[in-house]
Structure formats: C-alpha cells, structure tokens
Amino acid sequence: MVDHSGSWNWSRLTPWLAGETLEKIAAAIPPRVGVGVDVPGWRWEDNHKFTTRSAYTVLTKTNLSHGDSYWGKIWRLPVSQCIRTFIWLVFHRRLLTNEERARRHLTSSPHCTICGDSS
C-alpha cells in the first residue's frame, strides 16, 4: 500500500476505504524498510506491556498507588476468593445495605431487619 517513493499509494487505497479511514491513514507515517519491526505495545505502561492494573486505571481513571498496600494485602490473604471479594467490597464501601437496595427499588423498606435503623 506504499508506492516506490515511500508515500501512501492512494490509488490503491481510495477505491476500498471510506473517507474517514483514509483520513486516519493520512495521519499515520507509512511503513519504511530498515526502521525496524513494528510491534504492538500498551501505551499506558513505560515498558509497553499490558497489565490488568493499568487497564483498570485507564478505564476507571483512578490511581491505585495510594491504596496499593491495602489492595495487595486483601488479595494475598490466605482465604477463599469469595472472602477476599467480600473484604474488598467492605473496604470500598460497595456492600448493598437495605438503604441502597431501597434506592435501587430492590426492597420496599430502607430499614435494617435486625435493628430497624435506616442509616
């Protein structure tokens, strides 16, 4: 898809691609011989290697470094996965209380069934 001068060969690309795609190609530098192998890389890591941690950080726009010690301690606990998940939910205040369940219309009363409190 590159001509003899090293530019994009538009006569071969134009009949097959939409204008939006052609604009994106025009913004990219054409591949050149001798530049090296083109390898995929994860741009959000300095070493360009994908990690679940960096993907979570990118998707949630949060920085895990401040809670890293708690995060690591929770997931290294010698307990079953369901217990680790429960502790993680508690730590992040993600347990569904009756108040939250009522807000989501999952129950009719926001009051605790044991003590009657609604907070």
Image (cartoon, rainbow, N blue to C red):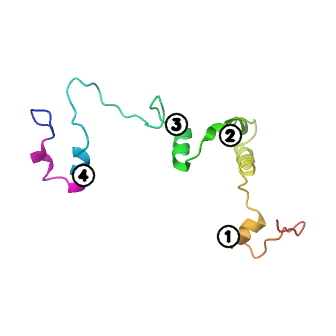
Horizontal side of 38 relative to 76 (left or right) equals left
The numbered mark at residue 21 is 4
Disc 1 + disc 3, Cβ < 8 Å? no
Quarter of the image that includes the N terminus: top left
The residue to which callout 3 is attached is 51
Q: Which residue is mark 1?
A: 104
Bin the neighbour count of mark 1 within 10 Å (Cα to Cα): few under 14, some 14-19, many 20 and up.
Answer: few
Label 3: how many Cα within 10 Å (few below 14, some 14–19, many 20+):
few
Q: Residue at x 29, y 27 (%)?
A: 37
Local SS, label 1: loop
Location of residue 44 in the rendering, given as x and y in whole percent from the top left corner: 47, 37
Query: Toward which corner of the image does residue 26 lie, by quadrant?
Result: top left
* Disc 2 packing (10 Å; few <14; some 14–19; many ≥20): few
Marks 2/4: CA–CA distance:
41 Å
**Magenta-colored span:** 9-21
- State whether residue 117 is above or below residue 73: below
